[in-house]
Image (tube, helix red, strand yellow):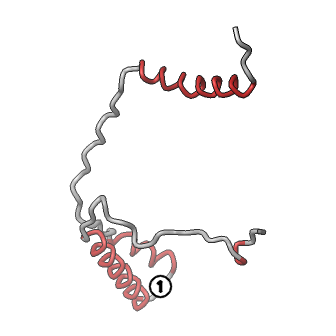
Amino acid sequence: MKPISRRKFGSILGAAAIAAPAAARAQQPKKRPPPPPPLPPAAEPQVAPAEPKEAAAAKYGMTKQQEEAVKQAIERAERGRASIRSYPLEYSDEPAFVFQAKAGKESGRRR
């Protein structure tokens, strides 16, 4: 038998290391993951009950004018959230903002 070089021996071991897990996976039966549960239908926007507003007014000692301003701010915020929720989105829609980290002077990273 002809002696084998270290380089050839290493390449044979590397090929065996790659082929062994692939062969093991090929023998296992394919398992399909269960389908995701269906999404519930979109619900109406939930408006906070009046009691927490009254409780907040009593807790923080607000005047009637301040209570009215808080109530208007809450209603304005809820209308904004309702309009955002009502906008139809597809699964393929891209986000409006994609974060990209850049290396530079501000990053504190040395080059």
In the image, residue 35 above or below residue 72: above
Q: Residue at x 69, y 8 (%)?
A: 1
Q: Nearer the viewer, residue 85 or 61?
A: 85
Relative to residue 99, is residue 27 drawn left or right? left
Q: Position of residue 22 (x, y in %)?
A: 49, 26
> For mark 1, what is the residue?
62
Give the structural element (helix, strand or loop) at label 1: loop
Relative to residue 49, is residue 55 drawn left or right? right
Relative to residue 49, is residue 63 drawn left or right? right
Q: Position of residue 109 (x, y in %)?
A: 75, 68
Q: Residue at x 59, y 27 (%)?
A: 15
Q: Residue at x 74, y 14 (%)?
A: 3
Q: How many dots with numbers?
A: 1
Relative to residue 59, is residue 5 drawn left or right? right
Q: Position of residue 5 (x, y in %)?
A: 74, 22
Q: Nearer the viewer, residue 43 or 53?
A: 43
Q: Nearer the viewer, residue 109 or 81?
A: 109
In the image, residue 80 above or below residue 17: below
Q: Quadrant of residue 53?
A: bottom left
Task: Give neighbour class at mark 1: few <14, some 14-19, many 20+ (Cα, 10 Å).
Answer: some
Q: Position of residue 48 (x, y in %)?
A: 33, 69
In the image, residue 74 above or below residue 29: below
In the image, residue 17 above or below residue 48: above
**Quadrant occupied by the C terminus:** bottom right
Q: Residue at x 45, y 88 (%)?
A: 63
Q: Amino acid at mark 1?
A: Met
